[in-house]
């Protein structure tokens, strides 16, 4: 039933044409990947070129860093967690999602999280954090503590693409991830 709910939703997403520009420029929609019963979801911004081509979130350079965080950092497997984005279509030229695009996609990511019911959501970067939590507060001020969103515990940290450009911030993200692991009971 859980997976069925996600499959039906994925089919709705694949047929969506609410954003004319995105629907006419995408190769495919990028719904999400991982364990449909995951305790932890990672929420990103939008597909890039690699994701648009492969149909899976976080498979490019930033995705490799996210995979390292999950596997080397948290000692989980990528298939144990669930990975999704705010937007299901690639914005041309990787521009930031527009407000109306996020509004069109909001029912999709909210229903996706409702079906999965993760105990924890890790927001990667400002687009994920500010749109989920409906705030204008910066990542720098949202990170380092747990927030509540509809009964889910939410951690905000830097986007892996930001970490690739600003490696000095990796130690902050590692602190955030350790806080998350402690809350998840993954630290001995
Ligand atoms: N950046 C994101 O926010 N999401 C992806 O899926 C890939 C890169
Ligand atoms: N600003 C962003 O947009 N993303 C980050 O991860 C950090 C700062």
Image (cartoon, grey):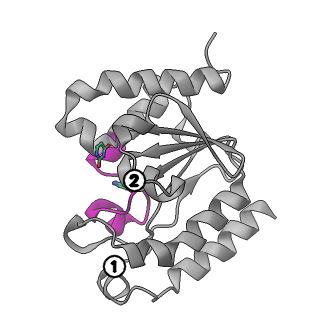
Residue located 17% across and 39% down the image: 165
> Which mark is in front, 1 or 2?
2
Queried whether the magenta region covers residue 53, the answer comes back as yes
What residue span does the magenta drawing correspond to? 45-64
Residue 19: quarter of image? bottom left
Dot placed on the residue nearer the N-terminal end, 1 or 2: 1
Residue located 37% across and 41% down the image: 139
**As drawn, is 147 to the left or to the right of 90?**
right
> Residue 8's spot in the image, x, y percent?
68, 76
Q: Badge 1 is on which residue?
A: 26
**As drawn, is 47 to the left or to the right of 30?**
left
Marks 1 & 2, CB-CB < 8 Å contact? no
Residue 38: quarter of image? top right
Foreground residue among 54 and 126: 126
Queried whether the magenta region covers residue 74, the answer comes back as no
Give the vertical position of 15 relative to 58 (above or below).
Answer: below
> Regarding mark 2 in the picture, which secondary structure is present there?
loop
> Residue 124's spot in the image, x, y percent?
41, 45
> Residue 114's spot in the image, x, y percent?
71, 60
**As drawn, is 71 to the left or to the right of 170?**
right
Q: Badge 2 is on which residue?
A: 136
């Amino acid at each position: 039933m859980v997976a069925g709910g996600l499959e039906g939703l994925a089919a709705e997403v694949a047929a969506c044409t609410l954003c004319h520009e995105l629907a006419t420029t995408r190769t495919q929609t990028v719904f999400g990947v991982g364990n449909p019963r995951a305790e932890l979801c990672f929420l990103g911004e939008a597909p890039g070129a690699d994701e648009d081509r492969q149909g899976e979130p976080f498979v490019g350079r930033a995705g490799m860093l996210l995979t390292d965080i999950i596997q080397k950092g948290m000692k989980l497997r990528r298939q144990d967690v669930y990975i999704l984005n705010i937007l299901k279509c690639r914005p041309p030229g990787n521009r930031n999602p527009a407000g109306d695009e996020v509004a069109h996609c909001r029912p999709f990511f909210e229903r996706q999280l409702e079906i999965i019911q993760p105990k924890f959501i890790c927001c990667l970067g400002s687009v994920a954090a500010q749109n989920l939590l409906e705030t204008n507060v910066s990542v720098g001020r949202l990170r380092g503590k747990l927030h509540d969103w509809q009964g889910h515990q939410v951690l905000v940290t830097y986007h892996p693409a930001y970490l690739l450009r600003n490696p000095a911030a990796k130690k902050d993200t590692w602190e955030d991830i350790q806080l998350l692991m402690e809350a998840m009971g993954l630290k001995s």
